[in-house]
Image (spheres, rainbow, N blue to C red):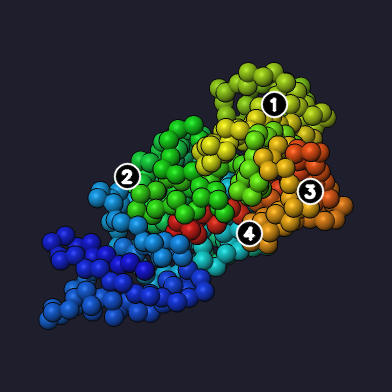
Amino acid sequence: TRVHNLDDGQPSIRLHRRIVAYTQTHCLRYLARKGTAALNLCNSGSEAPQPVKLRCHLLSPWDARNEPKRPKRLRVASRRAFTLTNDQIRVGINGFGRIGRMVARQIVANPQLKLVAVNDHAEDLGNLVYLYNYDSTYGRAPSQATVLNETSQSFMLDGHSVSCFSEFDVVNAPWESADVDVLVEATGVSSNVDGSHVLVGDERVRKVIVTHCPSVPVDLHLIVGVNEAEYDPLVHHVIASGICDANAIVHPIVHLDDRFGIEYGFVTTLHPWLSYQNLVDAPTVMQNSPGHYWTDYALGRSSVSTLIPKETTAVSALSAVIPDLASKFEALSFRVPTSVVSTADITIRLSAGPSIDSVRMALEDLCAASRVVEANYESLVGTDYRGSTASATIDMQWLKMSGDMLKLIVWYDNEWGYSARVVDLVQRVGLVQ
């Protein structure tokens, strides 16, 4: 752990401590217990201890072995004196839709996180609380939320109050009043990504996780289990978590390329309906985004009675993380009349021409080494993967090869599994305050 003295005019003090712990959380608790000793070292030579502002940078195992040089110019998210004794990360959610509510449920189940604020343009707080408590896909929330009274601007959840705002723009919500550490931007609106940079620059939040792959700039596109080593807490503050499809297909693609090499590939995703689609045939206006129309008229057709082919951003989302490999792929998608769980049909031409047994062993090695990729050997269907927290489950039953061409099927819960990765990123960027 590195501890830097940030008080202007004070000598630069750098403390190196070797902390042996099983998890990053234990490292934080260790530092909290030893905080007094660290402060005494910082104030050595003073007659009385002086308050010192600290910024801590938790080094990952690979960084600890090869600690990078400190950049000449640092963009520090905030100069607030964050406490070292608070184990919980204070989280805000902008956009309380499908992903926002699933992220909220997983935050409540995580003792390291605390949901403190929610912003949604819907003004009926009772309706938002109702949608959190009762979900047609995942059932009742284990921890129920309650509105205190009709005029309340907050609700009770997991024994504490959660502030609620109803602003269209993320910058207009008073996140600083709830002392938010990490904000989850879950609206999918580009202007709110721009607003996230403003929030960080104004020191109203420390970090922002964007739950899609925006076309506007962010500091880093990060997919858990792929490019986490690129994350620099001193530089990256607005971070995109990709999309559910990219989080699923990237793992086997990268691993197979490392083992055998990939010449080219094609991906077809089968994705459940989304809220912007129509129940019956109608114009292609997006109901949840007034003023936006889809140019492909097929997307206005009934979402519950037919398969609808469409373009997908899966490859462009991959390009933000693995550009060289993503350039070898093309993709398309079908909207299918189901409520949850997606699948990706991946066809790849491998360079090395391995046997199917070699490919199976390579994929099994991937699943054994990864905490976000799993393997399935049973005869399962889509609903069997509902509620899975894995980014991807490789269906070994449908692994096929013809010459150097490989076909594999990947399943993923496009809501719950993706939300689990968002929560992972919240922990990752918010651990050290």
CA gap, disc 4 to disc 1?
Answer: 31 Å
CA gap, disc 1 to disc 3?
Answer: 32 Å
Residue bearing mark 4: 370
Label 2 residue SS: helix
Going 69% across and 40% down the picture, which residue do you hit? 350
Which numbered tag is attached to residue 219?
none
Residue kind at label 4, given as amino acid type: Ser
Label 4 residue SS: loop
Residue bearing mark 3: 356
First in sequence: mark 2 or mark 3?
Answer: 2
Q: Along the horizontal axis of the image, is 48 left or right of 193?
A: left
CA gap, disc 3 to disc 4?
Answer: 21 Å
Residue kind at label 1, given as amino acid type: Lys
Residue bearing mark 1: 310
User: For residue 268, which quarter of the picture?
Assistant: top right
CA gap, disc 2 to disc 3?
Answer: 51 Å
Going 69% across and 50% down the picture, which residue do you hit? 392
Residue kind at label 2, given as amino acid type: Gly
Residue bearing mark 2: 201
Frontmost of labels 2 and 3 is 3
Question: In this rendering, does residue 344 appear at all?
Answer: no
Q: Are marks 1 and 2 in contact (CB under 8 Å)?
A: no
Residue kind at label 3, given as amino acid type: Ile
